[in-house]
Amino acid sequence: MRTRHLLLAIGLAAMWGFNFVVMEAGLRHFPPLFYVALRFLLAAFPAVLLVGGPGVPWRKVLVAGATLGIGQYTLLLMGMRAGMPAGLTSLVVQIQAVFTAVLAVALLEERPTRRRITGMAVALAGLALIAADLGTGGPIGAFLLVVGAAFFWSAGNIAIRNAAPPDSFRFMVWICGVAAIPMMALALLVEGVPRLEFSVEGGLSVIYVSLIATLGGFGIWGFLLKRYDASVVAPSALLIPLFGLTSAALFAGEPLSPAKLAAAALILSGVLYASTRARLLPASASAPSVQAETGENKMRQRR
């Protein structure tokens, strides 16, 4: 990856990591379901009128919108409203990589490698450490909501893989579009008509999560994926919880406990190990004796 593109990938991870602090700020001004609906509305309109069709069958857009859009963000924002801290949320949702691997085995009949199973076990150990730490007095219900959001994220990953959209940015715009109206209806049904008061913080929060984190973020992500293999781009996402935890500590005063740091190390190392391939030694380095034996045989044949 070129230097400027690497810096762009790091900047994207910082943008998405800081997004959790921004969402936490937005929840001080909006009910969670209404906040999700506002995010989708602003991200989808008027963009859907400018980008053209999604390029895939509508049923696949609807499945992705229901899982990656409504399911993920509804549980994520409800978990944060229930007390899940922003930095910790940015870390826990990375367990979606484990859920994605499990769903790929169940739905796509992929065969998990021993390396992937080991990595998933390490990541789950980190998740268990967080659950044990929260069980001493933290918001365990909020934690479970965020884990549920990670599951819907993984289901959305499978939906996107199955859809194979030709343009990831355009597809994301339509995911927001198909999720916006039912999400607003759900918000009004469950939360009622919200009492809105203008605030700079609330307004900037909605603008950031919809235009910058959603449209801008996935625009950059699609730009990088067009130029590099997914295996090159995807590991940069592991920087998201690093920026999430750091920004939460700096701007929200969220403490970094030893248990949280240990869990972060387990989850990130497990996900990284499961999502990368073991390097194989080249034949020249791995089998010198075979090469020597082959050379001796050729010399004998010449004689």
Image (cartoon, rainbow, N blue to C red):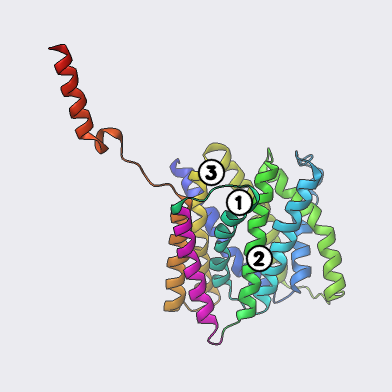
| Res 303 seen here | yes
Picture quarter with the N terminus: top left
Q: Residues within 10 Å of mark 3 (few under 14, many from 20)?
A: few
Type of amino acid at the residue the image marks with label 3? Ala
In x, y percent, where is residue 19?
A: 61, 63
Describe residue 177's horizontal placement relative to residue 259 as left or right.
right
Q: 296 or 6: nearer the eye?
A: 296
Seen at 47% across and 46% down, the residue is: 6
**Does 191 appear above or below 205?**
below
Q: Residues within 10 Å of mark 2 (few under 14, many from 20)?
A: many
First along the sequence among labels 3 and 2: 2
Q: Which residue is mark 3?
A: 230
Q: 70 or 31: nearer the eye?
A: 70
Q: Which residue is mark 1?
A: 104
Circle on res. 149: 2
Type of amino acid at the residue the image marks with label 1? Ala
Describe residue 266's horizontal placement relative to residue 95 as left or right.
left
- SS at badge 2: helix
- SS at badge 3: helix
Give the CA separation, mark 2 to mark 1. 17 Å
Seen at 55% across and 43% down, the residue is: 224
In the image, the segment drawn in magenta is 115-137
In x, y percent, where is residue 185?
A: 86, 65
